[in-house]
Image: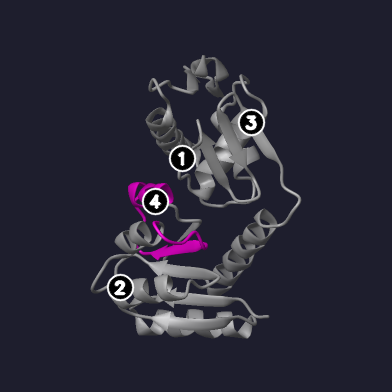
Amino acid sequence: MSHRILVVEDEPDIAAIVVDYLRHAGYTVEHQAEGRAALASMLAAPPDLTLLDIMLPGMDGLEILRQARRHTQHPIIMLTARVEEVDRLIGLELGADDYICKPFSPREVVARVKAVLRRTAAAQEPPAATTTVAALMLDESHWQATLHGSPLGLTRREFRLLQVLARQQGRIFSRAQLLDQAYEDTLDVNERAIDSHIKNLRKKLKAASADGSDWIRSVYGVGFALDPTAAE
């Protein structure tokens, strides 16, 4: 069965090209040009993947992403002409799966869509393991993490990062190592994004800890480690 892709783009020429290339690649494609209507469509019947522009009438793409992530974890790739790194980081922190800056090649868009759908399919395939570190449990079959039984509400990127740290608890990983092991098949993640994801992980782990322990240890100039002694 063909994957269903939602394209949210208000520029008619760009939307027409992207839709045409995706349909030619064999996808079923829907198009929305207004922010609020796009969010309603995403929540009413989540597609297999959304291509989401940031600058939209009615509601901007980052707000759509923020609200959508409360209800659906389907893959979302951001499309934007805003090339500032801070905008990319905000999108990734909110749970975007990838980021494509305009101007882009339609073939690149199709390639990114295929790559993200492959990663999503692989993540949903059994068998999946459960990783446990003290009171922290990672359920890899459902991409869910709990601490003392409380869900942490991690994005997929945060989960993958915590997964790498948890599998070798106590080991110090450099930012470059975390990039290679957690995001080896993701094009738009850099070392600064690692810092942002670590910050979010710390915040969520502290909130779920009985005593507000900091589970992630920073080693200045080296990197990060998951420290199970924080639970003691």
State the SS at label 4: loop
Disc with the residue nearer the chain's start (4 vs 1) = 4
CA distance separating discs 3 and 1: 14 Å
Q: Nearer the viewer, mark 2 or mark 3?
A: 3
Q: Identify which residue, 6 or 70, lies in the foreground.
A: 70
Above or below for 53 versus 155: below
CA distance separating discs 2 and 4: 17 Å
Q: Are marks 3 and 1 in contact (CB under 8 Å)?
A: no
| Pointer 1 local density, CA inside 10 Å: few below 14, some 14–19, many at least 20 | many
State the SS at label 2: helix
Q: Which residue is mark 3?
A: 132
- Residue 152 is marked as 1
Disc with the residue nearer the chain's start (3 vs 1) = 3
- Residue 94 is marked as 4
Q: Which residue is mark 2?
A: 35
Q: Identify which residue, 106 or 171, lies in the foreground.
A: 171
State the SS at label 3: strand
Quadrant of the image containing the N terminus: bottom right
Residue name at image x 57 percent, y 79 percent: 22
